[in-house]
Structures are given as structure tokens and as C-alpha cells.
Image (cartoon, rainbow, N blue to C red):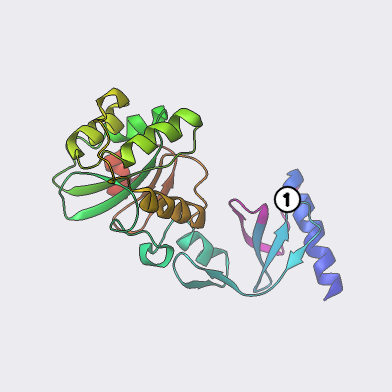
Amino acid sequence: MIKKILQMVAIYLILTCGIAFSKDITDKVDIPETGMMMVDSDGRSYFISKDGRYVIQGLMLDTWTGIEILNVADFRSTKDKVETSKVGLDADQIFNLTYGQGPKEVFVFVAPGCRYCANTMAQMEGLDDEYTFRLVPLPILGEKSRADIAALTCSTDQVESSLAALMGENYGLIPVATKGYCQQEKLKESMTVSQTMAISSVPFLVSHDGRTKRGAPASLRAFLEGSE
């Protein structure tokens, strides 16, 4: 077993240096946000640290989907998917503004001051009969972003104005806050969910069928239809 582990480390170092591809490796994939790689070799799967120091063999469970990952193929089939109920992604529990009234629910994590978010939101026009977009603003782009979202959480009794302010990046449209209406608890829940899902940048999308997308899609319609 020690010999096998040393062999796997050597293979990993060869792969990362781009020198060769070992015949023992049947498949491999990087695991985002972890600095780890998963490889299939001789009917087994291994997890190797970025520096090649640690090699792990054992159970991998995807808590986003509840699926046990047995090999690289399993990882690929689940890595861009999420079961919303398992991560607490519930429109009634988190702070969000709604655009559209279609039967298919889509979550779009955004932030004030994010031009890629603005571009993504602009593409929602014309899709509102098929999809209901839950826009979830996150205060992750500095002080102004946090201030704009704080204002939004206190003005959502004026839904149309708040939605227009978020989608149009015009926070002068935010009406005067209604005393006692601020939804700080729901905003905290949004942040908890975003941390659970390791959302470190926006936009971040969750489609109606559980597929996820980090970054702005070239075509929102194509992503939602599964053709991007």
C-alpha cells in the first residue's frame, strides 16, 4: 500500500507538471475550492493534495445532492448540481426579490456594483413567463454594496421600486425605509446559504433543475435550457 501511495504521488506530480500521462490513470478531475484532485486508477479512486503530499482513499459524500461519489464519473455528474432543500435554499427563508411569474424557479445570486450580474439580469427580459427568478443580493463587494443591500432589505414593501433599483443599478430609486420592515434575519440566512454553497463570487445561478453556474452565462436562455 505504501508503494502504491508513493506511486500515486509521483503520478500526480507528473500530471501537474504536464510532462506525461500515466497509463495507470483512467480518469482525473480537479475538485474546485479545495486544491485537491480526484483520480481513478486500477479500479480505485484517490484524492491527492495540490502539493502531492497527501493521498486519501475513502468515502466522499456530496452534501449538496446526498450522493456518494465513488469515482470521477460520479463527481462530474454531480459537481455542477445542487439539491436546494439540502442546502437551505428556500425563497421563503432567504432575502430575495422576484422577477417573473413562470413555473420554473431560478435562483440568481448577485451583488450591487457587479456589471456581470447586471448583464445577467438584463437577459431575464422575455423569460419571465417561463421562469420565476429569485434575485438574492449578497453584500460581498465592499462598503457601498453592503449599504445598498441594507437599504433594499428595508424597502421591500415597495417591491417594484426595489426590484428596479437592483436590476437597473440605480439605488436612488430605493424608497424611504419603512420602520420595522427591515429583513435582516433573512439576509443573514442568505449569507449562511451562500457560505454553505461556497459562493465566493457573483453572479452564481441555480437553475430550475438544480444545475449551477459560477459566473455570467454567455446566454442565460441557453444555460436554462441546458444547451450551454
Residue 217 x/y as whole percent = 38, 38
* 188 on left or right of 124: right
Report crowding for label 1: few under 14, some 14 to 19, many 20 or more residues within 10 A (C-alpha). some
What span is colored magenta in the figure? 20-36
Q: Is residue 212 left or right of residue 76?
A: left
- Helix, strand or loop for disc 1: helix
Q: Position of residue 66 (x, y in %)?
A: 46, 72
Q: Please give the name of the residue rendered at 72% of the width and 64% of the height, measured from the top-left corner.
A: 24
Q: Is residue 96 above or below residue 41?
A: above
Which quadrant, please, contains the N terminus?
Answer: bottom right
Image quadrant assignment for residue 169: top left
Quadrant into which the C terminus falls:
top left
Where residue 106 appears, x then y in whole percent?
A: 29, 50
Q: Quadrant of residue 17?
A: top right
Can residue 27 be found in the magenta stretch? yes
The answer to whether residue 218 is seen in the rendering is no
Q: Is residue 15 left or right of residue 86?
A: right
Res 160 visible: yes
Q: Is residue 194 magenta?
A: no
Q: Residue sitting at 33 percent across and 58 percent down? A: 93
Q: What amino acid type should be assigned to the residue bearing mark 1? A: Leu
Q: Quadrant of residue 10?
A: bottom right
Residue placed most toward the observer, 144 or 131: 144
The residue pinned by badge 1 equals 15
